[in-house]
Amino acid sequence: MNKYSYLVFAKIIDSDSILRDDWIHIDEIQEARDRFKSIGNLYHQVFSIPCLTEVYEEHSEVVDSIPEKFRCIN
C-alpha cells in the first residue's frame, strides 16, 4: 500500500436494507495530479476529475465503526 491506496469500508443504508462492502481503491487520479504538478503542468484535464483523495480530504467523517464487522480483505 502507498499514499494513493485506501482501504474503503462502506455502509449504505436504504429504507429497507443495509449494504456493506469493502475494497482497496488505488487513487490513480491523485497520482497523476501529483505527477503533473511535479513537472509544472497545472492545466491538464486530470485536475477537473474528482478523485477519492479529494472526497476523503474534503467530505469524510470518521464514524464509530469496527472494521472486523465487515468482510475483510486478506
Image (cartoon, grey):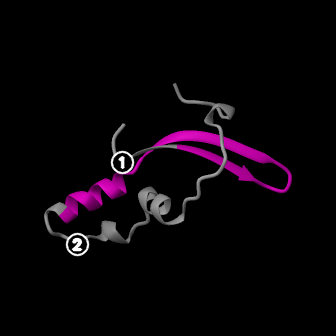
Residue occupied by mark 1: 4
Report if residue 12 lies within the magenta region: yes
Q: Left of 42 or right of it: where is 1? A: right
- Label disc, if present, on residue 67 of the rendered structure: none
Mark 1 burial class by Cα count in 10 Å: few <14, some 14-19, many 20+: some
Q: Left of 71 or right of it: where is 30? A: left
Residue lying at 35% horizontally and 57% vertically, measured from the top left: 29
**Residue extending furthest toward the bottom:** 43
Residue occupied by mark 2: 42
- Horizontal and vertical percent for residue 20? 69, 42
Between 32 and 69, the residue placed more toward the observer is 69
Residue lying at 34% horizontally and 46% vertically, measured from the top left: 3
Q: Left of 21 or right of it: where is 3? A: left
The local secondary structure at tag 2 comes to: loop
Between 64 and 55, the residue placed more toward the observer is 64
**Residue extending furthest toward the top:** 74
Q: Amino acid at mark 2?
A: Leu
Q: Point out the stretch of residues depicted in magenta.
A: 8-37
The local secondary structure at tag 1 comes to: loop
Cα distance in 3D space between marks 1 and 2: 19 Å
User: Which numbered disc, 1 or 2, marks the residue that appears first in the sequence?
Assistant: 1
Q: Amino acid at mark 1?
A: Tyr
Up the image or down, 15 lies above or below 40; here it is above
